[in-house]
Amino acid sequence: MHRSRTLHTTRRSVVVALDPTAAYEVVASGEAGPQWYVDAAPLVVRRWIDRLALGPALRHEPPGRPLLRSGDLVGFWQVVTADKKERRLVLVAQVRSPGRVTLEVTTRPHGDGSEVELAVTLSPRGLAGRVYELVDLPARETVSELLALHLLTILRRHDNRWGAGSVDQV
């Protein structure tokens, strides 16, 4: 896994054996049931934090179709971009925060497989947002790492011809 960060953005990228289109279809799946962008442990914790902070603590179910579309509400996210051609998914958090929290995932060709890059960005508002940005950096790093590992596990399950039981859990 490749890791990088700036004050505003934390990035993780992984390489998987799926072709870029198949990887994007996993990333942007709108199928009913558990989805990585709703049910990953760090996002469940964030929803509880939002509830404690008197935020909306939303949990919208996936729409029940093969792919997400711009405008969909899923978990506590609003889908801003779901571009199959570009293989790019951009979600904006609908949570109490002194700034805008964006999750962007792109898939691109890498050898015989794909590189999947996940970026979490905080665009702070006002002085409170700037302070929060500094205080939140370690938490953002942890959330990004856990979210990338969760997504990697799911992508590997889709790539594994022997079934999910033969993939190491992360």
Image (tube, helix red, strand yellow):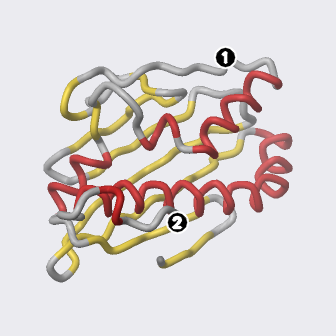
Residue 96's image quarter?
A: top right
x and y percentages locating residue 17 in the rendered image: 22, 72
User: Which mark identifies residue 5?
Assistant: none
Residue drawn at x 27%, y 30% as measured from the top left: 31
How many badges with numbers are in the image? 2
Residue drawn at x 54%, y 44% as measured from the top left: 40
> Which type of secondary structure does the marked residue at label 1 adopt?
loop
Left or right of 160 on screen, residue 116: right
Q: Name the amino acid type tagged 2.
A: Arg
Left or right of 39 on screen, residue 161: left
N-terminal of the pair, mark 1 or mark 2, is: 2
**Above or below for 101 versus 112:** above
Q: Nearer the viewer, residue 68 or 88?
A: 68
Left or right of 4 on screen, residue 168: left
Question: Are the residues at dot 1 and dot 2 in contact (C-beta closer than 8 Å)?
Answer: no
**Above or below for 151 versus 51:** below
Q: Which residue is mark 2?
A: 11
Q: Nearer the viewer, residue 160 or 145?
A: 160
Q: Which residue is mark 1?
A: 56
